[in-house]
Image (cartoon, coloured by chain):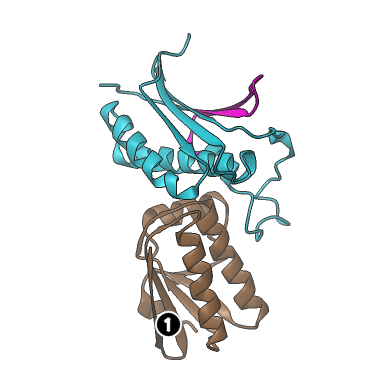
Chain colours: A cyan, B brown
Amino acid sequence: MAAEEPQVRISVASRFEHIDLIQIVFDDALARFGLDDDARHWVGIAIREAVANAIEHGNRRDPTKEVDVELAFDGEEAVIRVHDRGEGFDPEEVEDPLAPENLLKPNGRGIFYMKSFMDGIEYEPRPDGGTVVILRKRITDPS
Amino acid sequence: MKIDARHEQGVTILEPKGKITIGVGDVALREAVGEALEAGARNILFNLSGVSTIDSSGIGELVSAYTTVTNRGGKLKLACLPSKVTDILQITQLISVFEVHDTEAEGLASF
């Protein structure tokens, strides 16, 4: 099924301080589509991780490069797309944070948390540059 | 994010309030631990009761603080975890790394 038009779309410069704004706006939109407080907390963390990765690893903290974040509803799923302007990466190369040798590393848990808190995660390289991370969350009782 | 620091029974208690997230809370946490160690702290107890949100960067700072304090021969423990902090530590199996106490008093008595 083709995704519907985005309900919310925000573009921000690559600065970490914008992540709070994105989470507040998306939390409000997800509440209107029936996600309860608990579900919105974890989806909010996943969105934070995706945007932080886009700023840090995608756009290399270059404030002249934007991150676009969109929310759409596709059937009974919330679909969140986070688009950076970076050079892309291979998600298969990300180390397992649960491996004993990685357990006490300070980094490397963001993608794991996204996978844990969402029902689906995909990566889509864009021909015009950058990567789109697509996060999916089922909404059982859309209003 | 604000961090209250106090000393009781030879233990430095750090009590962050608000979000421990990338770019703000994680930096404040790193600085608070650094200041405590510079002041001679050996044992640190984090009272996390006031933490509303923690992300992978915040978790990373807790792990960094744990390894730094341990490598110096001290101990770092956690107390008063909100359920969502417990959940996020469990998901990445870090709950078994940290010594966790239900109350601050229990945590203090354990050093």
Q: On screen, B68 above or below A139?
A: below
Q: On screen, A79 above or below A50?
A: above
Highlighted magenta segment, given as a residue range: A116-135
Q: Percent from the top left, x then y, of residue A26?
A: 36, 34
In magenta segment, residue A125: yes
- Name the residue at 60% across, 77% down: B69
Q: Which residue is mark 1?
A: B108
Amino acid of disc 1 = Leu
Q: Percent from the top left, x then y, of residue A59?
A: 61, 40
In magenta segment, residue A21: no
Q: Percent from the top left, x then y, of residue B110?
A: 47, 82
- Name the residue at 51% across, 72% down: B31
Residue found farthest to the top: A1
Q: Chain of mark 1?
A: B
Secondary element at tag 1: helix
Few, some or many residues within 10 Å of mark 1 (<14, 14–19, 20+): many
Would you say residue B106 is visible in this rendering? yes
Front-lying residue, B63 or B92: B63
The answer to which image quadrant residue A128 occupies is top right
- Name the residue at 34% across, 23% down: A140
Would you say residue B96 is visible in this rendering? no
Looking at the rendering, in which quadrant would you find the C terminus of chain A?
top left
Is residue A32 left or right of A101 when viewed as pictured? left
Q: Percent from the top left, x then y, of residue A84?
A: 58, 33
Is residue A92 left or right of B64 when viewed as pictured? right
